Image: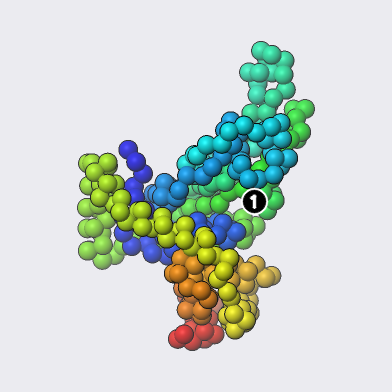
Amino acid sequence: MPPFPFTAIVAQEEMKRALLIAAVDPSVGGVLIFGDRGTGKSTAVRALAALLPKIRAVAGCPYSCSPDSPADACPHCARGRGKSHQIPVPVVDLPLGATEDRVVGALDLERALTRGEKAFEPGLLARANRGFLYIDEANLLEDHLVDLLLDVAASGVNTVEREGLSLRHPARFVLVGSGNPEEGELRPQLLDRFGLACEVTTPTDIATRIEVVRRRDAYERDGEGFCAGQAKAEKALQKTILSARERLGDVSVPDAVLESAARLCLALGTDGLRGELTLMRTARALAALDGAETVTVAHLRQVAPSALRHRLRRNPLDESGSTARVARAVEEVLGGA
């Protein structure tokens, strides 16, 4: 059965907008989705990947390298490239119980035992290159895997030094995590690595709940027919994403908007400058999706909660949640623009 269509997801506008922004500009830094179970988190990630156009990759390359990327950056492609073909955008699940060998790759034991060869068996990071690495229940991920992901996410390269192997391969992916905040918090180092953080909640109005159930039931009864009914909307959204990618480099960010972003981050007391950078990149990607040539304060207002809520220091004198604090600062700094 084909994945549930992205355009058929009801409500959850902040989550959908964040995923589209990450699809337009992966440099935003990935998306963290926190909220109740059964609110469409994993459905949205798989739906977005299915929506995106196929990518060109070197045939036979275990890292799905682009034919246009430098050959010496990949141990496979450095030995020579053959034909290229089109493949779906990779979406790789990282299970909570995954071993380090499965994640980073390890010695191919079958070839070592049968042929006496030291060969590398790529792991999940290799499969995720140029795609999405999805971690459900990211707040329950073991610490040693968190450390590993932080290194790879920062460099875009996976380095393997074990069992007599010494190898580096490309591992650039959009990191998407989801979880339930009631089951534990994310380590601050990993939390800061996500560009955007979204909150999803169970719908409380009857009409929305009915529509969710109706669409899901129709999909489960006739997946092919349901997806066919959304094909036109999916094609239109795919075209919007492609157009946004093409115009992204031409979207300007005025100094006045940069100043507003800086003032907002100062008012919230965010550490470092990653908040401003993410806010600028996110607003620019949203402007590209909107077909705008210039980023406006209105774009900042839309993306500020997702870009900043997970970067706030704890304030023992302020019992309000991070989302409320961001909303208050937006009104004070940006006004009603």
76 versus 147 height, above or below: above
The one nearer the camera, 309 or 287, is: 287
Residue at position x 34%, y 41% from top?
2
The one nearer the camera, 206 or 6, is: 6
What is the x, y in percent for residue 321? 49, 71
Residue at position x 54%, y 65% from top?
248
**Circle 1 — which element?**
helix
CA neighbours of label 1 inside 10 A, class few (<14), some (14 to 19), many (20+)? many
Q: Name the image quarter holding residue 164.
A: top right
Residue at position x 27%, y 42% from top?
223
329 versus 312 height, above or below: below
**Residue extending farthest top:** 114
What is the x, y in percent for residue 246? 52, 61
Quadrant containing the N terminus in the rendered view: top left
The one nearer the camera, 75 or 311, is: 75
Residue linked to disc 1: 153
- In-image side of 90 versus 162 (left or right): left
Name the amino acid, label 1. Answer: Ala
What is the x, y in percent for residue 288? 49, 67
Q: Name the image quarter holding residue 27.
A: bottom right
